[in-house]
Amino acid sequence: MLTTLLIKDYALIENIIVDFGKGLNIITGETGAGKSILIEAMGLLLGERASTQVIRKEANKSVVEGVFDVTYNKKVERLLSENELDYYDELIIRREITLKGSNRCFINDTPVTLSLIQEVGNLLVDMHGQHDHQSLLRVSTHSEYLDEFGDHENILNKFREKYNELSEINKELFLLRNKEKSIKQEKEIYQFQLKEIETVSPEPGEEEELKTQLNILENSERLLELSNKILESAYDSENSVTDLLGIIRNNLQELSGIDSRFAGKLNDIDAGIAIIEDVSKAIRSYADKIDIETNRLEEIRERLASFSLLKKKYGGTIEKVLGHRDKLREELDAAENFEEKIKFLEGRLDKVRKEAGENAFELSVKRKSSGGIIEKEAIKVISDLGINDSQFKVKISSIKADESSANFILVNGSKYKFNSRGIDEIEFLISTNLGEDLKPLSKIASGGEISRIMLALKTILAKNDKLPVLIFDEIDTGVSGRIAQKVGLTLKNLSEYHQIISITHLPQIASLADRHYSVEKKKHDDRIISTIRSLNEEERINEIAKLLSGEEITGAGIKTAKELLKNKKGGE
């Protein structure tokens, strides 16, 4: 429900704030007072294109803001969530048009795109009259209206499950077939690369181990030379460290026999001799194990060279080379299994096509039944609203798919094109004059006639129509008397299911309002501006009397106005 509308510096409007209520909200006013400007501003709020020409003279920008109560509106909640916007029970939409030509859009004070404003607007408001914001004129909505009227939600959801499953299978098949084609083209390359890696067959950590071995082998001669020198100096040569220490010990022993103060030093010499012997033993053991393997040295160098070549071609490290090898194995294994996978998915695809076709056929049967009911009711209501000799048709058609087409479902053994709502193409057709051919709703006459047809259809679809706000711009154009009363009562009945905002010039309709507003022109600071105000009971009597008798209110006009207001609930 639209609770508040703010318009600032838009055409003749300087600054107005209107609070709308539930039920039937009626707007009246003299020709040229600004009623159409008000509707244009509402259209701007819902995403219609704007021009800088709408900005009021001497102002820098125009602002239109609407506050909507969207409590329990799941469609709006879902759309906001998809666009990462917070959902509140109160939704604020704002448009700003500047002299520089910038067009700023906001939802709950968050900047958004114009297209999102349009999407949200399509979920909140239907405008009927001289404007394009009319859902029933969009063929794409006709299947939605028909399904909501017929309460086809369960079978439609079953079909959509199959539709989504078909989409997933087709997507997987598309990827598999493309991958199979790609792998077949590159299979020889993959096999060559895998053979090249597996011929070398590096192991994790092997490169580091080989480098350690290479370092040792490349220095083995020097290691043996150093070991022998140590042994020679310590033990094997004349005047070796061991021999010299033996001489020192003998001399020290003789010295301590003369002077006992040196007796304790013999232990230190013995310890030194023992250390030298241990070191010599370790070096001798190490030297015995040193093997100068020229062949092994070349083997390691060649293997490390092959590692370097693999690293250069396949990733820079042995770990990446091994990763590439595993990926090649997977791709080649997958290539062997593609045919089996594709055959399985194709079998599943055939099964789901038949299941989807069964659901689509059931949905189509229900639609034809519901369409027949709408046709009968539409002709009756349209006639009641003063459009006689009319015809109304819910055209339901389906198109068979070409034999070569890959995108189809099977209905009773035949291939049919389909979309997320089934196989049916649905369009509302109408003829408003005797002898004329049926035409799409978008091709019929403009103005009040379109609005009355929309009103008739909305009346039929009212209980299931999810759009909360309906705006009618001079729906009563070209009608008077009994038909005007019918139009008014139809609007009144429709307002039980929707918030109705309607501009009218007929007293029979105005008298049925739950809230009545008057648009007026006023002089302000040597300028003319448009204003709008909510009327109290006495002001309503005068306004309706004006509609009856013109600017000069007569006693008879006042009396009739009171009678209309008194009988507004029934209109009899």
Image: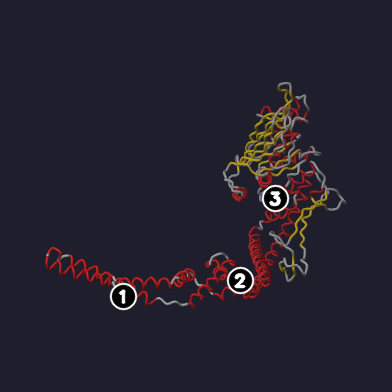
Tag 3 residue: 461
Q: Position of residue 441 (x, y in %)?
A: 79, 49
Quarter of the image for residue 231 reads bottom left
**Circle 3 Cα neighbour tier, 10 Å, few/some/many (<14 / 14–19 / ≥20):** some
Q: Which residue is mark 1?
A: 236
Which amino acid, by three-letter code, is at mark 1? Asp
Q: Extreme right residue here?
A: 435
Q: Name the mark nearer the viewer: 2 or 1.
A: 1
Q: CA distance from mark 2 to mark 1?
A: 66 Å
- Sequence-wise first label, 2 or 1: 1
> Which is nearer the eye, 556 or 302?
302
- How does the figure colour the protein chain or chains? secondary structure
The vertical placement of 75 against 508, above or below, is below
x 72%, y 28%: residue: 530
**Label 3's element?**
helix
Rendered image quadrant of residue 345: bottom right
- Residue type pointed to by label 2: Glu
Q: Secondary structure at mark 1?
A: helix
Say which element carries label 2. Answer: helix
**Residue 532, placed above or below residue 83:** above
Q: CA distance from mark 1 to mark 3?
A: 116 Å
Q: Is residue 305 left or right of residue 528?
A: left
User: Quick one: label 2 or label 3, which is nearer the N terminus?
Assistant: 2
Q: How far from the left and from the top, in percent, is residue 405?
A: 75, 67
Front tag of 2 and 3? 2
Look at the picture and state if 194 lies above or below 368: below
Q: Which residue is mark 2?
A: 331
Residue 367 shown left or right of residue 261 in the figure = right
- Looking at the image, which is closer to me, 221 or 552? 221
Amino acid type, label 3 = Leu
Residue drawn at (68%, 59%) of the image: 420
Q: Residue furthest top?
A: 526
